[in-house]
Image (cartoon, helix red, strand yellow):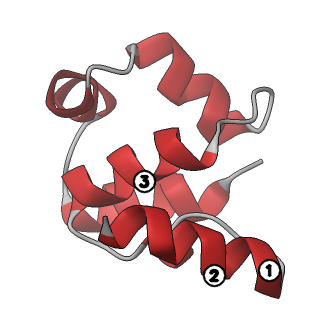
Amino acid sequence: MNSKLKTTRKRIGISQMDLSHKTGISQGYLARLERGTRRGSIAVYARLAHALGVPIQEILPLDDALEQEAHDVYES
């Protein structure tokens, strides 16, 4: 379960539907990401983080190497 994504989304006060519209990612796919039944790519999480206005690390727990790659993608 990716509770970090769901927790962050709810803290910001945005619905799955609104986040779906902002990112072009389907609401069903977002729900599966939040439940942990689907694993998104770094690019997907970068889009989500950008739409939420948070660093990607806030919604995706990563090891050090992947965290640096995610940071690089988010910053570009």
Q: Earlier in the sequence, mark 2 or mark 3?
A: 3
Q: Nearer the viewer, residue 15 or 44?
A: 44
Q: Which mark is residue 68?
A: 2
Query: Label 1, label 2: how many angstroms apart (C-alpha)?
Result: 5 Å
Answer above or below: position of 76 versus 68: above
- Residue 62 visible (yes or no): no
Residue 66 placement (x, y as % from top left): 75, 71
Q: Residues within 10 Å of mark 2 (few under 14, many from 20)?
A: few
- Residue 53 visible (yes or no): yes
Residue 26 placement (x, y as % from top left): 39, 13
Task: Tell me the residue that label 1 is attached to.
Answer: 65
Please tell me whether mark 2 sits on a helix, a strand or a loop. Answer: helix
Tell me the residue at 49%/76% (across/down).
71
Q: Nearer the viewer, residue 51 or 41?
A: 41
Q: Which mark is residue 46?
A: 3
Tell me the residue at 28%/25% (across/down).
20
Q: Earlier in the sequence, mark 1 or mark 3?
A: 3
Please tell me whether mark 1 sits on a helix, a strand or a loop. Answer: helix
Q: Residues within 10 Å of mark 1 (few under 14, many from 20)?
A: few
